[in-house]
Image (cartoon, rainbow, N blue to C red):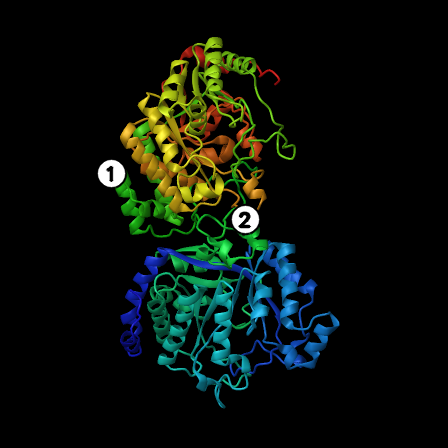
Amino acid sequence: MNIRSNEELLSLVDCSAALLQERASILRDLGFGNIVTYSPKVFIPLTSLCRDSCAYCTFAKAPSKAGQSYLEPEQVLQIARAGKANGCFEALFTLGDKPELRYAVAAEWLEQRGYRSTSQYLVDMAKLVFEETGLLPHINAGVLNSDELSALRKVSFSQGLMLESTSERLCQRGGPHFGSPDKLPKVRLKVLEDAGEQQIPFTTGLLIGIGETRQERVDAMVAIRDLHERYGHIQEVIIQNFRAKADTRMARSLEPDIEEILWTTSVARLIFGAGMSIQVPPNLNPSALHKLIDAGINDWGGVSPVTPDHVNPEAAWPHVTVLAERTAERGKILTPRLTIYPRYAQSYTTWVDSRLQRALQDQMDSEGYARADHWSPGSSAPFSARTSQASPTLRTMVSSRIERIVARALAHKELNEGEIIDLFGARGQDFDIVCKAADDERRRVNGDSVTYVVTRNINYTNICSYRCSFCAFSKGKVADHLRGRPYVLDLDEISRRAVEAWDRGATEVCLQGGIHPSYTGNTYLEICRAIKSAVPEIHIHAFSPLEIRHGAMTLGVSSDVFLRMLKEVGLASLPGTAAEILHDDIRRIICPDKLTTEEWLSIIEDAHKAGLRTTATIMFGHVEQPVHWASHILHVRRLQERTGGFTEFVPLPFVPMEAPIYLRDGSRRGPTSREAILMHAVARLVLSPLINNIQTSWPKMGRSGAITCLQSGCNDAGGTLMNESISRAAGATHGQEMPPDKMEQLITAAGRIPLQRTTLYGRAGPDRISASYNARALAAI
């Protein structure tokens, strides 16, 4: 839909803004839906000295007026720390162009401190801010050569240079860029090209109203687009309107009117298409924010709670609350982003220096936006128990697309991948609608009862020949630096734990372990025989599909034959673990030697055909994205359509603290609270009525998180566990047992009615319930 032909480009010049806005707005919605972003940032004006003499600029000052040549490191840190304390993510370094080439005082200041250039000092200051505060540096340093860009790439996440215009005549005598060698269009275009070659996420744009024509604006946009199509590195295009300022050569020049601003903004959207971020600074047009959204923008740029706009100090930043309200009035949700835009953040291995990647992953969510909270699964950090992620005083409009998707889900239509991705992207009122719809469906299917099972986890060995990068539980023969030592439980200890579990009211034991290199299929058969011999009545819920494949291969039989052998000696159901993410692109990263997606699905289908019910799980929040979540859930839904063998769906948020992939800087730190809640709510909507039980994991979600999930579509609180090893090994802090009285307190706190169940969702018998409430303390292990 974007404009490409010369004929179309020429026709834009004579169009009114009103004629272009509707098409621009449609394009923006195709690319960004109802999200409008901004970057909470702090501005660090490293120096206001500049060798250029632009006719409109008040930022650049002579040494006599600047006060000091450069900010000292302590001053830089003071500003950065204030930004960090006020919730900023970005440190924007602004500075003049190469002042040391014009002013001796600048060159002397740098030389006294051991620097040959401003850019060299800037490298150290960006590194200092990043290392001391964790803010993500963005660099606006003017014209840089290839070596300077490369050096700054190592200490920053993105860089920028406003092209402003490609009009050579603006650089001639009498023009606004006369006497400014760094404003020559070919010089600035060379910087944009060099940045593309070095894969630097780059910001650029136009300064309009300085004497250029509409045609010249179009020419500049096409030049930017051509470079972006070659390198893919332009992350945003800014349309900045000239402001007349006192004490400049253009003090009496007319500023562009709102028609010109809207025209240029709409044309930018039409030229760059749906996927480009188009920004207009909100402080320069405070009375026209709604019109700018209508013209196709999707970003407000940097808004600072600490520092002014040093380029336009007369124009105060709007308060974020006001900006959110104006954005909401146009049906959009104001969403904080990082200095690096989402599509580049999600491909960080390409666009970000390896030494910076960990910090980026820690601050981004699955879509590449800024994380809105400090919570991680298994951590003791506060979890927002409020179901709504929208401000309680700000009511955004629900998008019609989300309403349509929710309506289809409630009508039990199979959603497609794109629709599921949209549900996972829900924010503001959309988030509330998704969660409420999921909970309404839960109430329709399950009533107000929330079930739980009294069970004991028995992880019979943590020695494993596989090296899944997310797993902190499995050990080699020596793994003292991780939680716990390698161990193997013998059959007597497994039987003892099963007997003790039965005595404490359990209806099941859940058994899983590492793939011990000496285990065979006979090991798993012997475990079942030993448990059934010790406790004939107990339900054995055991062995992931990976263990099934291992056992079958060691006996030289197929998986379906081995499953029937296990069933004959007492296996009653399987945990649907080892699923992680059912998408082979992700499995190649997190568990390359494990089951493929097709192998997992095939073994689960064999189990269902053998009359063995299973759970289904997803382990999310590490390296994957919502598209992979959607694919996973659709795999589960379609298998359930064929077999009907799943009893429940269990989202398992990735616990990062001790996970090898996180410790090696290879993953995010688990899902955000919003994403964790949505996983449960979306699963309810997508899987109903084929799978009627959605479970929340209290060891990973914590008490507040579990309660919130029970209010967002979940009807099951999982098991009491007695011994919880896997989440604890990964760093979770929420305990190893949730006894019945505590479990029922949690369920009651969610406004639900607790109900003790069996593995297959029957009601637990009175003797089991009584035993569970009168359980003795676990014997020491």
- The disc, 1 or 2, on the residue closer to the chain's N-terminal end is 2
Which element carries disc 2, helix, strand or loop? helix
Compared with 452, 416 (above or below) is: below
Q: Position of residue 86 (x, y in %)?
A: 57, 55
Q: Residues within 10 Å of mark 2 (few under 14, many from 20)?
A: some
Q: Is residue 60 above or below residue 528?
A: below
Give yes or no for contact between labels 1 and 2 (Cβ–Cβ under 8 Å). no
Indicate the position of residue 58 as horizontal and vertical percent values: 56, 78
From the top left corner, tell me how far across and down residue 452 is, in percent. Answer: 43, 23
* Residue at 47% in and 31% down: 697
Q: Which mark is residue 362?
A: 2
- What numbered label is drawn on residue 411? 1
The part of the image, by quadrant, that contains residue 1 is: bottom left
Q: Residue at x 33, y 68 (%)?
A: 270
Residue pictured at 59% horizontal, 60% vertical: 154
Figure quadrant of residue 776? top right
